[in-house]
Every structure is written in structure tokens, then in C-alpha cells.
Amino acid sequence: MSMNFSEFKKLLGADPWNRDPDFLRARNSSPEFERAAAEAEAFERKLQRALHTAAPDDLLEDIAGIGLHAVKHRRWVPLAMAASLILAVGAAAIFYKQTHTVIDTRTYVAEHFALDGMDLIARATAPVPEQDIRAVLSSLHAHAGPQLSERMRFIKFCPTPHGTGAHMVISTDQGLVTVIFMPDNKVRDGQMVDFNGMQAYLVALEHGSAAIIGRPSQHVAQLRTIVTSSLKTGDAQV
């Protein structure tokens, strides 16, 4: 029996990183489910960054009763508790806004891939139907040409530093490669990011950007032309 949206939201609220097969099937069943999951993951990322914001000890001591030390060592915090924590730590961070560094694209790409990049590659076993590709990208006011869509083995919505994007896995002569489309992010074109034995090649698009991620042996920079010529913004179909 398929999971309805209400049941999905309850599980999502309990654990945004849920990897139960039934939960994942429900998540990928429609843009509504994916969007809710992306928003929950984005909130969780903001929470974790806030909880790890450096601030002087005497200031943190003034924030009474929030149990910061205990929370820092937990992977997950219930969302009901998170609301009060984000306000408390956020209040401290306001005084240190000048020194607080917002996550940059390079850090985001590395953390995003570390979260589920390899899991999604393992699930990318068959071509993605054109209507599924269109459903995700049209919601982001984008579309994929044949060079990209015919290689597509997985696609879903995902959170980006400035909004919602798309996480794609494509087939290449060097194996499966990840492409993260960030419609609201600007990057320095041609920058290469190395992390954990992987490389991400950042590509500036007409609107937004993309990160092409793979092993060094996959020469991800060579996929630049496919991405720039096939991943287009705007509502018209290629």
C-alpha cells in the first residue's frame, strides 16, 4: 500500500534523513513529496550549521537551559525542539553576524554528496522516463535536451544553498556521474573542488549553475559541453 502525504510528513518530521525503502519510494513518487523532503533537509542543514556556530563561551552561558552541549553531539534533533534551539542559538549568532560564514557552494557540494551521493548512484539502474525528467526540471523553470535526458539514470529535487535544485545521476563512458543543478546559485565557472576522493567541476549557466561530480579518473570537466548545451533555463522545451 502506498504511503499518503500525511503519513509521509509524520515520518519526515521524525527523521529527515530516513532511508527506509518505503519512505524513499514515497519520497520519489511526486514533486510534492520531494519538495517537502527538500525543505525538511534544508531546515536540518541550517539547524546543524547554527548549532555549530562558534561564539564566545560567556555568551553561550547566558543562553540558559537549551542543552547545547548535548545537542552538538546528536546526529538528529526533533523538529519541535529544533524551533526553540534555532531561536536561542540564532539570537547569539546575531551579535556575531560579521564573523559567521554562510556555507559556500564548495562546502555545500561536498556535504551534499557525502549525505546521499553514493546511495543515489547505487539506485541509478535504469533510464529515467522523459515525463519524470520534465516534471522535476519544469518546476525549476528548466529543461534538458536529448544529450542529457538520454543519459539520465536518476533525478530528484534537492535543497541548495539558495533554494531548490535537482540532483541527477547520468551515464557516461566513464561510469555514472552526478550533476547537481542549482538554479539560484552563482559560481566561479570552471572551478574544481576536491573532496573525499571525489571531484566537483562547477559550471556557470545562463541562470544558475551546476556541479558535475565524479572520481578524478572520470574527468568530469569533459562533461561541461553536455551540461551547458543541454541543461537550459526557461519554460520552452528543447
Image (cartoon, grey):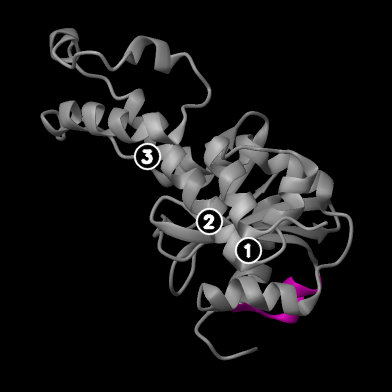
Of residues 134 and 9, the one nearer the viewer is 9
Give, as a three-letter code, the residue at label 2: Ala
Q: CA distance from mark 2 to mark 3?
A: 22 Å
For the question of whether residue 95 can be seen, the reply is yes
Residue 91 against residue 26 in the figure, above or below: above
Give, as a three-letter code, the residue at label 1: Arg
Residue lying furthest left: 95
The local secondary structure at tag 2 comes to: helix
- Residue range (magenta): 143-150
What residue appears at the point 63 percent right and 63 percent down from the top-left corner?
Answer: 224
Question: Circle 1 is placed at which residue position?
Answer: 224
208 lies left or right of 15: left
Give, as a three-letter code, the residue at label 3: Ile
For the question of whether residue 215 can be seen, the reply is no
84 lies left or right of 195: left
Query: Which of the numbered marks, if any, corresponds to residue 103?
Result: 3
103 lies left or right of 232: left
Query: Which of the numbered marks, if any, corresponds to residue 36?
Result: 2
Tell me which numbered mark, 2 or 3, is placed earlier along the sequence.
2
Q: Position of residue 227 (x, y in %)?
A: 63, 68
